[in-house]
Amino acid sequence: MTSTLRSFYSYISDFPSPSPSVIISLYIIIMISLLPLIDIAALESQYPSTTFIIVNGNLDRLRTSYYPPLFYPKLANVSKSFYSRFTQVFFLSPVAVLGDRFGSWIATQYPGSWELLVLQPNERKYDVVQRSDGAFDSTKVWKEATRVYKQRTGRMF
């Protein structure tokens, strides 16, 4: 168990014993590393009716096999059994184009559509250039972002 989660457990155990009428109904967990993901899934068995909110959970990576099951077998198991049931309410990820790390972004906010935003360099603002009801294909997004960025900047490479 990680030290972060150990302190989380000790914090919980410091609470006075709840009466049978008190139910823990919400956990908000702010994460900055991969290690607690497995431990957090274990909390569900202790508090099965609790709602979990995880900030910076990298759910997109957990759902797309970014972490190969061969090297992360425990994480693969909890990804399928626990994290696959989560609803991602906000996603924002940069798409690098022509050397500009922040030339475009993919974004969504539940229950809205997915959007591809591309920078207008002269005005330093982003415009939505494409929308989709489902998640984008990463290769197509990069190609479209690069095409629009080239048009706006006049750069070829």
Image (cartoon, grey):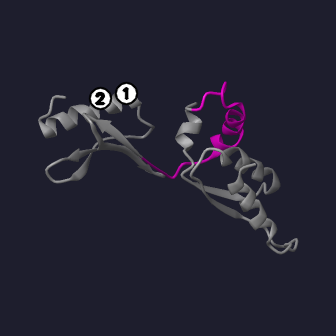
**Front residue of 44 and 37:** 37
Query: Callout 1: helix, strand or loop?
Result: helix
Decide whether residue 122 is among the magenta residues.
no
Decide whether residue 82 is among the magenta residues.
yes
**Horizontal and vertical percent position of residue 122:** 13, 50
Relative vertical location of residue 105 with respect to residue 46 in this rendering, above or below? above
Q: Identity of the amino acid at label 1? A: Thr
Seen at 37% across and 27% down, the residue is 139
**Horizontal and vertical percent position of residue 62:** 59, 38
Cα–Cα span, label 2 and label 1: 6 Å
Seen from this angle, which residue lies furthest front?
A: 3
Question: Do the residues bearing badges 2 and 1 touch, measured as CB atoms within 8 Å?
Answer: yes
- Residue 74's tag is none
For the residue carrying disc 1, how many other residues have a C-alpha within 10 Å: few (<14), some (14-19), or many (20+)? few
Residue 116 visible here: no
**Front residue of 66 and 35:** 35
Seen at 40% across and 31% down, the residue is 138
**Horizontal and vertical percent position of residue 108:** 42, 48
Residue 59 visible here: yes
- Residue 143's tag is 2
**Front residue of 80 and 32:** 32
Q: Which residue is mark 1?
A: 139
Q: Bounds of the magenta span? A: 67-92
Relative vertical location of residue 53 with respect to residue 113 in this rendering, above or below? below
Query: Callout 2: helix, strand or loop?
Result: helix
Seen at 15% across and 40% down, the residue is 152
Relative vertical location of residue 88 with respect to residue 18 in this rendering, above or below? above
Q: Identity of the amino acid at label 2? A: Lys
Using residue 19 as the reference point, say whether residue 61 is left or right of it. Answer: left
